[in-house]
Image: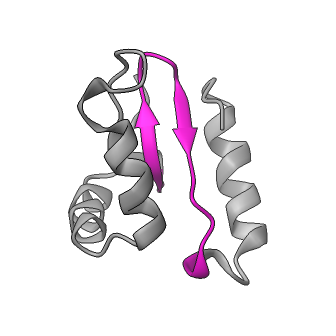
Amino acid sequence: MILFRYINIVYARKLRTNITKSEVLLWNYLKGKQVLGYDFLRQKPILDFIVDFYCSELNLAIEIDGESHYGNENKDEIRQKEIKKYGVSF
């Protein structure tokens, strides 16, 4: 199990209400175990970060790099390296 900070749960809930169009399109495909029966979560806290989509069965995180990521490429790279230490694939 990968730990997370409680404050990230509150922030993740807020992010779920402000979903981007590209996230909506992908979520419509991922939700309800439509992808080979795998269960995906949206805006999942992992460690000190929040990933757009996560499947615990596959230990797979999916990030949609839209406008919110512009100029944050370095932070995104650090986040990805930290999360990968726990065996999560992107």
* Quadrant of the rendered image containing residue 70: bottom right
- Pick whichever, 78 or 60, lies toward us: 60
Across and down, in percent, residue 80 comes to 68, 48
Q: Residue at x 36, y 49 (%)?
A: 27
Q: Say above or below: 12 vs 89.
A: below
Q: The N terminus appears in which quarter of the rendering?
A: top left
Q: Is residue 29 visible?
A: yes
Q: Residue at x 23, y 31 (%)?
A: 32
Residue stretch rendered in magenta on the structure: 48-68
Q: Is residue 44 visible?
A: no
Across and down, in percent, residue 44 comes to 36, 47
* Quadrant of the rendered image containing residue 43: bottom left
Q: Say above or below: 58 vs 88.
A: above
- Pick whichever, 76 or 85, lies toward us: 76
Q: Is residue 55 left or right of residue 82?
A: left
Across and down, in percent, residue 39 comes to 32, 25
Its colouring scheme is one colour
Q: The C terminus appears in which quarter of the rendering?
A: top right
Across and down, in percent, residue 34 comes to 33, 27
Count of marks, rendered view:
0
Q: Is residue 53 magenta?
A: yes
Q: Residue at x 29, y 25 (%)?
A: 33
Q: Is residue 44 magenta?
A: no
